[in-house]
Amino acid sequence: MQLLERTSLRRVAGLSTELTDVTEVEYRQLRLERVVLVGVWTQGTAEQADLSLAELAALAETAGSEVLEALIQRRDKPDPATYIGSGKARELRDVVVATGADTVICDGELTPAQLNALEKVVKVKVVDRTALILDIFAQHASSREGKAQVALAQMEYMLPRLRGWGESMSRQAGGAGGSSSGGVGLRGPGETKIETDRRRIRERMSKLRRELKGMQKARDTKRDSRRRNEVPSVAIAGYTNAGKSSLLNALTGAGVLVQNALFATLDPTTRRAQLADGRDYVLTDTVGFVRHLPTQLIEAFRSTLEEVAQADLLLHVVDGSDPLPADQVAAVRQVLIEVADERGTSLPRELLVVNKVDAADHVVLAQLRHMMPGAIFVSARTGEGIAELQERLVELMPHPEVQVDVLVPFTRGDLVARVHSEGEVLEERHLPEGTHLRARVRADLGAALSEFAAPPVPA
């Protein structure tokens, strides 16, 4: 009985979804796809396997599909031919027929051969987790750079998966008769349609890479400008739908789009804000992560992830209401470490921020406080814990290195304003001669203030 349970296709309860409104979908055909999900459980607990398929259901719903059924199979490793094995593939075909599904979504990245073989058995379209995430990104990308990054990732995924059907894919004849056509043994179908498509995709990919390189230079210029002005930077990273944009709004009042959906934010959003001590800093909201984030997307969104690598502080946002928050943390850290290793840099200092405490179970929160000492627990929606987070930011942000004690005349109010916005004011008094300041400032501002050094106080 146990052996039968281990090898059978097991239904995962509670994953059926039904969308009532798909009018907001602008980047795809307005046709509600009816899908069956299938996953292979190779390691971890049953709870982790079910949660992975639940996440796949949420991804499918975000893409505009209706989930009819979810199946999972226990195997040591995916079948190299059909992902779930030929016998289980026939069982999956029966489920597809019974539910009236038009698409099967697999919880993993399938090889071109696996996709082809499984489609032949189930006789409906088969897509994998990678293609699904790419589809969501294509729907949500709004900026020119975001659209270019998604297009490049899609083409990298698509290129090895182009398929043809024999001679019907021949587009032109290389030897159409006559001695000038090449002669006996050299005549053939010429460049096939699939070869033409591959060539065009490669050309388009080269063009996109050139465009993204130009956009990279523009962003580097802005970042270098901030560096020259020594404005501290904070990057918000975390799992998709953990509440990163909500936290950005809570800290800055930016009014960034907040949506209860996976990958609502694709383009990095940078906003200027003030620390509790009056210093300016910039806060950047980045794209969310997900388990098994496709390699193509990590590569395409490298520019977005660079904002994390070059920040002074990383706010790692965790969804406190998620059943397995520790798995979220591990998935995010894995991707960030990969990016940092490839750049040859180290990651900035990390501050864990557990969000959505208003929706989390008290017992789970108690466990998280034990698991994550030093983390700040907040609710971006209600404002709980935000003040504590702002105080912690003051402690962790780099402090200006030059300490000054100056008496600035009232005619140089511009310098006083710069001390407040760029430096850290320790003491301020208004005297008849001007404004007396004790503060920490950058070296260039310290040099500008040097002529106003305060006279020593007589004993």
Image (tube, rainbow, N blue to C red):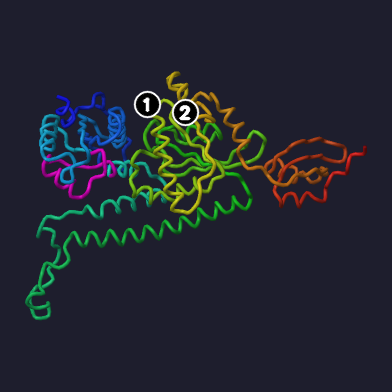
Q: Which mark is residue 323?
A: 1
Measured as percent of width and height from the top left, residue 254 is found at 53, 36
Q: What residue is rendered at 22% in x and 48% in y?
A: 111
Residue 313 belongs to magenta span: no
Pick the front one: 31 or 71: 71
Q: Residues within 10 Å of mark 1 (few under 14, many from 20)?
A: some
Q: Which mark is residue 371?
A: 2
Q: Secondary structure at mark 1?
A: loop
Q: Does 206 appear above or below 315?
A: below
Measured as percent of width and height from the top left, residue 60 is found at 28, 35
**Real-space Cα distance between discs 1 and 2?**
14 Å
Give the extent of the magenta segment. Answer: 106-130
Q: Does 160 appear above or below 253?
A: below
Q: Residue furthest bottom?
A: 179
Measured as percent of width and height from the top left, residue 91 is found at 11, 33
Quarter of the image with the C terminus in it: top right
What's under tag 1, amino acid-wise? Pro
Q: What residue is rendered at 20% in x and 27% in y?
A: 11
Q: What residue is rendered at 17% in x and 31% in y?
A: 9
